[in-house]
Image (cartoon, helix red, strand yellow):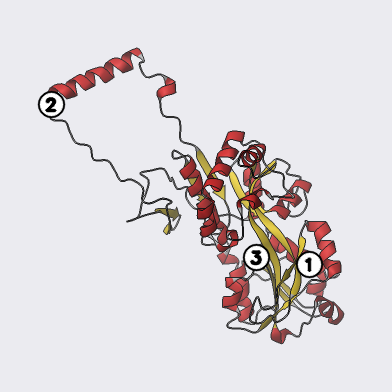
Amino acid sequence: MSSIDNPYAHQQTPRRAAQVSIRQGGLKPPGNGSYVRSSAGIIGRRPSVGGPLPGRVRHEAGRGTMKRLAFTTLVAAALAIGAFPAAAQTAPAKKITLTGGSVGGAWSAIGNAIGETIRRESPGAAFGYEPGREAANIQLVSTGKVELGIAHAQLVKRAQAGEEPFKAPITNLRAIALIDPQAAVQILVREDAGIESFESILAAKKPVRIALNQRGTLMAVTGEEVFKAYGITAKDIEAWGGRIHHVDYNAGLEMMKNGQVDVIINMLAFPSGQINSATREMKVKMLGISPDATAKLGALLGTAPITVPAGTYAFQPAAVPTITGSVVLFASAEMKNEDAALIVDGMIKHFDYLRQAHAMMARLEPVNLTQTAPLALHPGAEAAYRKAGLLK
């Protein structure tokens, strides 16, 4: 589906956050936590786990000249005869970079929380978070540019098959953990748009204005496929005088509030704070997905049926049938087993902290971390889950 008339294009350039070392003694704000930097400067604070990091150690000079001389002589002698073998030297710090979603979003919060669990499990590790988009995240991890990525499992499945938006199969990706079991398709329609169902759009050849998510996301692909499941293509919408906007979700909600779009589709947990906030200023209703369309989408995307319970939102008195995907943390198959196991061990050990990082992880129990289908677990992650008793 082509993107037409995107007035928010200037807002869609992703910011690339500089890698932030979370080793002890790194950049710190007053009190607990550490700063996250971007090209625009300091953009926020990341809370630390388990209290403040230790400050600089004050070095006090010894008073005895003879003691200093003796120490200097010993060090020089040791270096001269190779008294410090390689095994006794400090190992290079492990560097792990994770690419997720935009700064300030759910994936950013969860990605940085995962980084904290890595630091707790491996105090010498250096962790960096980079904003991204999920199709690009898949490419970056596959090519070894970064170690970890966040994406919908269903989009990774499309990558493995070489389906849109990917040009060729990407087969070297493996799951580390499930991080969101409920990414439900939620379809909002302005109450004054005169739209009762997808069938009514097709029957009237309505010039509908649609906001989908940005290109390269499962949300955008799914929005396109929902219309196709009802026999409505992008060309049809254009021919009827409608328009399709590929913008981030907040921008799409603003466009809907301003009367610029009639329909907006996204995949997110319910109840959504974004939806609750936006619908205080406009009247909307939620469209459901028929059983036939649900079956088509499940076969095509790997989604599953789900129901948004009645009363989830103030504007939604009846239950609404829809579909859902899932979000995973993934790595390349080339990641060392011990590195994958270290990441999993940290997530399990500090699971209560992870659940507090964002509401979408609050629904998880440790056993759910293993449920990454349709993406297979990394062997190192699988071994760690078995060791913890979460897999048999």
Q: Which amino acid does label 3 sit on?
A: Leu
The answer to which of marks 2 and 3 sits earlier in the sequence is 2
Nearer mark to the viewer, of 1 and 2:
2
Q: Quadrant of residue 105?
A: bottom right
Residue 136 visible in the picture: no
Q: Is residue 317 above or below residue 225?
A: below
Quadrant position of the C terminus in the picture: top right
Q: Which amino acid does label 2 sit on?
A: Gly
Tell whether label 3 touches label 2 (CB within 8 Å).
no
Q: Distance between the residues labelled 3 and 1?
A: 15 Å
Q: Which amino acid does label 1 sit on?
A: Val
Q: Which residue is drawn at 67% across and 53% down?
A: 135
Q: In which quarter of the image is residue 362?
A: bottom right
User: Left or right of 339: which side holds 242?
Assistant: right
Label 2 neighbour load within 10 Å: few <14, some 14-19, many 20+: few
Q: Residue at x 41, y 43 (%)?
A: 23
Residue topped by disc 3: 268
Q: Describe the element under mark 1 as helix, strand or loop.
A: helix
Residue topped by disc 2: 64
Q: In this view, does 19 lie above or below 237?
A: above
Label 1 neighbour load within 10 Å: few <14, some 14-19, many 20+: many
Residue topped by disc 1: 226
Q: Which residue is drawn at 56% across and 47% down?
A: 348
Q: Who is closer to the viewer here, 198 or 210?
A: 198
Residue 79 location (% of width, % of height): 32, 17
